[in-house]
Image (cartoon, coloured by chain):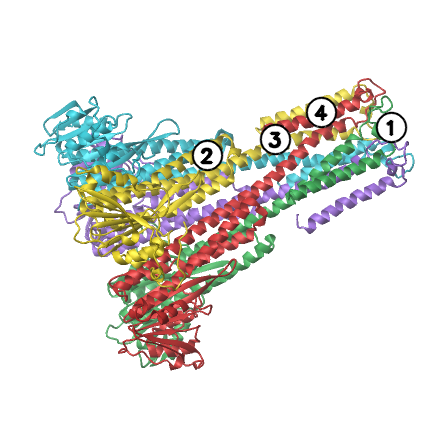
Chain colours: A cyan, B purple, C green, D yellow, E red
C-alpha cells in the first residue's frame, strides 16, 4: 500500500492531464431507481449525462475499474467533482479519509484481500455522495458491490434500500466495504492459530520467514484500516453529516464494525508478536536440548579417555616396581574396564539426579 | 471471542430470516412486578404480548438461552426492537457497546468465565431497557441472574429493587454481569501467583505452553472487558442517560467495578509478561549452570590427557639418554600421578577462586 | 491489594447485614472543636449521636480500626451515609476515588507502607466530609493522623486548622494520607540504588528473585497510587467542589504531591527495568568470560595432544626408515617438547593479539 | 538536525547583530504578479523596497540561500518581521511550527533529503505570509520551488495560481515543501525491502552498522516531520487562519499529505525494528547451525577415540590371559574397525532421527 | 533530583520555623529600574522593605543562594508570599509548576547542568512575579542570570528590557532558565555520538557501566524537564495569564524552546536505547566469532587425534596379518601423515565453503 504521488511543486488536481484525450471506450454502469422502478444501463464514461438536480430518483454511477486520468478529469468537470478528490482517486494508496464539502461528500477507504495464504493486497475504494447521486470508483479486482446491486433489484417496493435516499445507498456501499475486513481478519486468525499449533508440536515446521511476513502483512493491514475510523467518524457528526438521522443510526453500526476490525487487528498483532517470541523460545529450547545431550556425551568420555591414556604410557615397568605395576597384574585389564564402567555410570547417575537430562 | 458476521454487502438487520417460520417451542420467562405483587410465567416467545405503555408494572422478559433468528425477528417486530440490535444479538462476539435510542436503550456486554484451569470462555449478554420493561438475552451457559430474581421475590415491599423502576432492574442486571469479572480475575491472579512460586522453586515444573496460553487468555479477557467501560459510560451522561438520577448514582459504582476489573487485567498482563521473562531467565540460568559444570570437567581432563599422551609416545629411549628419560626412572610413574593430581587440584582451586562454580 | 467483592447479583450496599446485631464494644474517638475550645471523647460507635446541622463546631469521628459491618451499617443509617460508600469501606482494596454527593463527599485512598525490606502493604483510608463533620475510617495498622490531632490540640486560637471549617480538616487528613507515599518512594529509591551498586561490583550478590519481587512491588504500588490523581482532581473543580476557595488552594498542593509520588513511581519502574536488563547483561558477560577462558584452555591442549598421539603410534621403525624416524633420533624428544611449547605459546600470542582474553 | 541556539540569558531576536554591517552583495529574487502580468527581478537584499499595502499585486521574495544575520535583521526591520521569527530563521534546526500574528503568518518546516544511500540531510524552510506578499527563506541546497515558479510563469490568465491571492502561493510553497517527504520515504521503503530480501538470502551481506544507521536516520526523519502536523494544523482553524476558505480546502489536502508521510515513517520504523530482530534471529540461527554441526562431529569422534585409547594401553598380555586378550586374536583389529564404524553410524542415525541435523 | 518533604501530617507552609530567629547575615541584591535609571543595592534579607504598590519602578529581588527557612518565612510574611510556595522553595526537588494566584504568580523550574562527563546535577529555580516586582531564588551553584542583569545595565533607554514591565523581566529570567537545557542536551548528544563511533570501532572501549549511567542520567533529565511544559503553559492562557499580550508573544517562543529541549531528550533516550542494543549485539557478535574459531580448531584436531590413537593401538601384528598391517608397511607413516593433512585441509575447505569462517 504505497501512495502514488505527483512531483513536489506540481499543480494539485488533474490539470496536467485535462488536455489529453479521454479513452472513449471506458464504460461505467448507471443505475437509477426510486421505490417504483429501476433502470441499469452501461455507458461510455464520456457520455454519462451531467446530474440533474431536479431528478427525484437516485443515480448510482458504478465504475467497474479504474478509469484513465483524462476520462476522469473530463467526467469530474461535468459532475463538478473537486480536483483534489480526483487526484486522490487516480493516485491510489491514499490514507482513508472523508471530505465533506458543500453538497458533496467524498470518502476513501482501503479494502484488504488475502491474495493467497500470506499476501495481503489492499485496494482503494472511493465514494462520492451528492444530493441525488452516489459514485463508486475502485481499483481493479473482483466485484465488491454485487450483493448491494442485487438488493436494489430484488428489494422492490418493500425493501429498505429502494425506499431510502442516496445516503442509504452510500451507507450500504460503505458498510459492504468495511465488512470486507472481517473475512481477512478471520483468515489471519485461523492462520495464526494453525501456526501456533504447529509450532508447539514441531518447531521446524515453521520458518522465520513466515513469521516475518505475517508481521509485515499485519503492519500493512493495520495501516490501511486504522485511519478508517477517523474517516467514518465525521459522517456521524450531527452538525455537518450529509446523512439523515435514520441513516446515521445505521452508520453507527458500520463504524462499530470498523472498530471491531481494528481491534481484531491489534489482537492479531499482539498474537503475532507472542508467536514470534514463542518461536524463538522453542527454537532456543530445542538447541539447548541438543547441546546439552552432546555435551554430556563428551563429558562422560573425556575422563574415560584419560584412564586409557594413563595406561597407554610407556613407563619402564622392568626398571622399577613403582612404574605402573597395574600393567603386570593378572586382573588389571578387567579391573580397569570395571572402573571405566563405574566412572561412566557414576557420572550418568550424578547428571540424572541433578536433572540435567 | 470471534464475532459472527453476515456476508459483506448483505442487508443489515434480520430481514433475510423474517420469512422463515419461528421455532414455536422456544420459551421465555416473563416477570411482572410492582411494590405489591409479582407474577412469573413461562411463555413461548411467539406468545409474549406486545408491551403495554399504560402498564405501571415493570416487565422483565428473561431469555434462558439464545433464540433462533426467526423467533427473535418475529418478537423484535412486535416489541419494536431495532433490526441492527437484533442482528447483534444473533451474531454473538460483538464488542461491548450501548445504543441509546428514543425510548429504548440497548447494551451488549461480554461475560468471561473460566471453563477449566486455563481456558476462558466469553459469553455475550444483551439487555434492552424500555419505558416499563427490561429484556435480557444471553448465550447459553450457567444461569447468571438467579440472585437478582431471588431479590425480586424476597425483596417484597421493603426491598429497593421492587420499589424502583425498570432502570434499577436494568442496573442490577448490568451490575451482576460486570461483577462476573471479579472471580475470573481472582482465579487468574491465584494461578499467576502459584506459577510464580513453582517457577522460582523448580523451573521444569512450568511449561512454555502454559505461559503462552496464559498470555493468550489475558488477551482475550482484555479484549472482551476493555471496551465495556465505553459501553457503560453513556449511561452516566446526564443529558442522554435513560437512568434516573438515583440509579445513575448506583451505576457509577458499577462503572467503578468495571474499571477495577480492567485495571486488574492490565496488572495481570504485566505480571504474565514478567513471569515469561522470569521463566526465560531461570531456564537460561539453569542451562548455563549445567554447561559450566560440564565444561569445567572437560577442561580439567584435557590437560591431564595431554600428559598421559606425552608419556605414551614411543621415542626410542635406548638410542639416546635425551629421549624420555623419565620413563626409565624409578619413581617416574608415581611422580607423574602426583603431577596430574597437582594440576587437577590447581585448576579446581583456580576456578573456585574466580567463582566459576 | 486485592478488592474484596460481594457475589455477582447480590444487592449493593450493606443491606444483607443490617439485621445482624452490631458489636457494641467497637469504640470511636469523637473530636469537636472551634476556635475557642476542643473536646475529645471516646464513645461506642452505636452511641455516637446523629450530626446536628445547627452545630457550628466541627466534629471529627475518628475510627481507630475497621468496624464490623453491622455496626457500620447501623452508624451509616443514622448519619445518612450512602450504602454504596459503606460497602466500599468494608470491601477494602477499592480503587481510589471521590464521590461528591449532595451535602456529602466520600474519598477512598490507598496508603502504601514498606513492611520490611521488599514487601509493600497497601491499606485503605476512607474519608467522609459533611457540612460540619469529617469521618475517617482506615484499615488496621499504625496510627496515621496523630500529627493532625496534635495540631488541633496545640493550634489553639492562632492556628490555621482550628480557625477553619471541616473542609480544611478534610484537606489536612488527605494531605497526611498522600504524604505517606514519600517515605515509601524514598526507601525504594535507596533500595534500587544500593542494588545497582552491588550489581556493578559483584553480580552474584543480587538474585533474580529480588529483582522480580521489586518489579511486582512497583506494580502494586503504582496501581494503588496512580488512580489517586483522578480521585483528588474533582475536589479542585470549581463548580462541584465541596471545598472553599482557600482550601482548594491548599488542595492543589496536595494533588501536586500525589503527582510527584506518581512520577517517582514511574521513574522507579523504569530504573527497575533498567536494573533487570543490567543484571542479565552482567550475568551473561560473566558466563561468557568463563566459557571463553575454558574454551581457550581446551583449544590449546587439543593440538598438543595430537602431537603426543602422533608419536604414540606404533609404526614399525625397524622395517623402514620412513616409519617415524623421529623416534630414533638423539634429540627427538626434547625437540618435540620445544615444538609443543612453541605451538602453545604461538596460540596464546595469537589469541592475545586478537584480544580474545 | 540540531538547533543552533543563543547563549542562555541573551536578548531574544537579532538585536545583537543589528549594528553590524549587512553584506551588501546578498541578492534575492522579487517576483510580482497578478492575473495579467508577472515581473521577476533580482535585487540585493538591502535594496528590496518595503511592502506597499496598497499594491494589489502579489509579491514573492525568494531567498536563494541563507542570508547573513545583519542583512536579515536590516530587511526584517523594514518589512516589520518579528525579531523572534528572524532569530528562528538564522538558528536553523528549529522544530516545525506556525506563528499566526496580526497581519503576518510565519511557518517553519524541515525538508528531508537523502544525500546518498543512507544519510538524511534535513534543511529548514521558512515562509512568511503577509497581506500581499510571501517570503520564502531556505537553507542552502538544491532549488525547491522551481516548479511553483514555473507554474506562475506558464499559468497565465487561466491558471489557478495567478488568479489567486498570496495565500494560494503560500499554500503552494507549503505543499511543495511537504511533498518533498514522499521521495525520501519511498527511497527508504525500497532500501528496507532490498535489505530484507538480502537478509533472508544471505545474512552476511547485511551489517549491523547499516541497520543501526537506518534506525538513526528514521529517528532524525521522524523528529523533523512529526511536529509538522501541529505546525500545519492552525492554518486550517477557521477562527484564526490567514487563509481564505477556498485555500483552506487545498490546505487540508496538504495536511493530509503530511500525515501520510508521518504514518509512512512510523511504518518504516516498525519495519526497521522488525528487520533488526530478523537480523539477530538469522544471525543466531546461522551460528547455532554451525555450532551444532561442529559439536556433532566432536561428539562422534570422542567415543571413537576412547576405543583407540583403550587398545593403546600397555597391559601385559604375557602375564595373564585376562589382560587385553583381544590384542592377540586373529581378527581383533578388523573387528574393532567394524565396531568403530558401527558406533559412528549408530550415533549419526540417532542424531538424524531426533532431527538434530 | 529527589524532593525534600515534611513529615506526613505536619502543617503545610513554614509555620513551624517562623518562631526561629532569622539568620541576619543572609544578603540579597535589590535592583530597581525604570526607563531612566537603575539602582542596585545589596541588603540583608531581613531589611528588604515591603513592596510599595505605588512604586512605578520595577524591583527585582535576586537571592544569590538558598536562604535559611526562618529568614525566608520572615521575608515571605512581609511580602505576602503564599506559605505553600515558601515550603516549595525550601524543599528543593519539586516538580516544575506554575501557580497563578491573585496578584502574584509563582513558577518553579529545574535547571540541569553537567557536572562532569556523565553526571547531571539538577537545581531548582523559583520565580515570583508581582504587580511591580520579580523575585528569583535558586539553589546554590554558578550564577545564572548575569547576562540578564547585564542587559538591564547596558540596555539603557533604547533597550526592550528596561522599557517593559516586570512581566518582561519575569519572561527573560524564565527564558534564561529554559535555555540552560540546550548546552546539556548538546553535550549529551556529542557524548552519545562519540560513544557510537567508539563502539562500532572497538567494542571493548565502551563499558556496560557507562551505558547504564547514560540511561539513568537521561531519566533524571527527562523527569526534571518534561513537566516544565505544563508549568509554562498556563502563562500563555489568555484568560488567566499575568503577562501582557506582547510578552505572551515572547513567552510562546520560550515554551517552544522548552519543547525543543523535551523532544531532544526523547530522541536522546531513543538513541541511548539503540546504543545499548548495539552494544549487546556487538559484544555478542565478537564472542560468537571467538567461540566459532576456537570450536573450528578443536573440531579439526579431534578427528586427527582419532587416527593417531588408532595407530597407537597395540594389536599383535605378529599373530595375524589382519592386525594393523599398515604398521609394517614401508610407507605407512608418511601415508598417514598425508592422510592427516588431507583430512584437515578437507575440513577447512568444507568449513570455508559453507562460510563458517
Residue B144, how many percent across, how many down?
A: 31, 44
Residue that lies at the very extreme toward the left in this rendered image: A54
B155 in relation to E240, above or below: above
Of mark 1 and mark 2, the one earlier in the sequence is: 2
Provide the chain ID for the residue under circle 1. D
Residue drawn at the location 60% of the way across and 52% of the way down: C204
**Callouts 2 and 3 on one subunit:** yes
Q: Which mark is residue C319?
A: none
N-terminal label among 4 and 1: 1
Q: Give how far across and how far down residue E110 sits, in percent.
A: 41, 63
> Is residue C65 visible from the viewing direction of this image?
no
Q: Earlier in the sequence, mark 3 or mark 1?
A: 3
Q: Nearer the viewer, residue D32 or C214?
A: D32
- Give yes or no for contact between labels 4 and 2 (Cβ–Cβ under 8 Å): no
Tag on residue D293?
A: 3
Name the mark on residue D340: 4
Which numbered disc, 1 or 2, marks the residue closer to the eye? 2
Protein chain holding label 2: D
Give the labeled residue for mark 1: D320
Q: In which chain is the residue bearing label 4?
A: D
Residue C170, image quadrant:
bottom left
Amino acid at each position: 500500500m504505497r501512495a502514488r504521488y505527483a512531483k513536489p511543486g506540481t499543480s494539485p488536481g488533474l490539470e496536467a492531464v485535462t488536455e489529453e484525450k479521454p479513452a472513449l471506450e471506458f464504460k461505467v454502469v448507471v443505475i437509477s431507481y426510486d421505490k417504483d422502478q429501476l433502470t441499469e444501463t452501461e455507458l461510455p464514461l464520456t457520455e454519462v449525462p451531467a446530474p440533474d438536480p431536479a431528478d427525484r430518483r437516485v443515480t448510482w454511477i458504478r465504475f467497474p475499474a479504474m478509469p484513465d486520468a483524462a476520462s476522469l478529469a473530463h467526467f469530474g468537470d461535468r459532475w463538478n467533482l473537486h480536483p483534489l478528490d480526483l487526484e486522490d482517486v487516480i493516485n491510489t494508496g491514499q490514507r482513508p479519509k472523508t471530505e465533506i464539502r458543500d453538497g458533496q461528500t467524498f470518502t476513501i477507504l482501503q479494502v484488504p484481500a488475502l491474495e493467497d495464504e500470506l499476501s495481503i493486497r489492499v485496494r482503494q475504494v472511493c465514494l462520492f455522495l451528492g444530493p441525488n447521486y452516489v459514485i463508486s470508483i475502485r481499483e481493479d479486482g473482483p466485484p465488491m458491490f454485487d450483493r448491494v446491486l442485487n438488493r436494489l433489484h430484488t428489494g422492490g417496493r418493500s425493501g429498505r434500500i429502494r425506499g431510502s435516499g442516496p445516503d442509504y445507498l452510500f451507507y450500504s456501499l460503505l458498510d459492504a466495504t468495511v465488512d470486507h475486513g472481517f473475512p481477512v481478519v478471520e483468515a489471519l486468525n485461523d492462520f495464526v492459530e494453525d501456526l501456533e499449533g504447529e509450532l508447539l508440536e514441531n518447531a521446524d515446521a515453521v520458518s522465520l520467514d513466515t513469521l516475518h511476513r505475517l508481521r509485515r502483512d499485519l503492519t500493512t493491514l493495520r495501516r490501511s484500516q486504522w485511519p478508517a475510523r477517523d474517516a467514518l467518524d465525521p459522517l456521524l457528526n450531527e452538525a455537518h453529516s450529509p446523512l439523515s438521522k435514520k441513516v446515521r443510526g445505521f452508520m453507527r453500526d458500520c463504524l462499530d464494525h470498523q472498530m471491531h476490525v481494528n481491534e481484531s487487528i491489534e489482537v492479531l498483532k499482539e498474537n503475532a508478536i507472542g508467536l514470534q517470541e514463542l518461536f524463538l523460545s522453542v527454537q532456543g529450547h530445542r538447541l539447548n536440548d541438543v547441546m546439552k545431550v552432546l555435551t554430556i556425551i563428551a563429558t562422560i568420555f573425556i575422563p574415560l579417555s584419560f584412564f586409557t591414556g594413563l595406561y597407554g604410557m610407556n613407563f619402564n615397568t622392568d626398571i622399577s616396581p613403582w612404574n605402573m605395576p597395574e600393567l603386570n597384574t593378572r586382573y588389571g585389564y578387567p579391573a580397569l574396564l570395571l572402573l571405566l564402567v563405574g566412572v561412566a555410570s557414576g557420572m550418568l547417575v550424578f547428571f540424572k539426579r541433578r536433572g540435567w537430562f
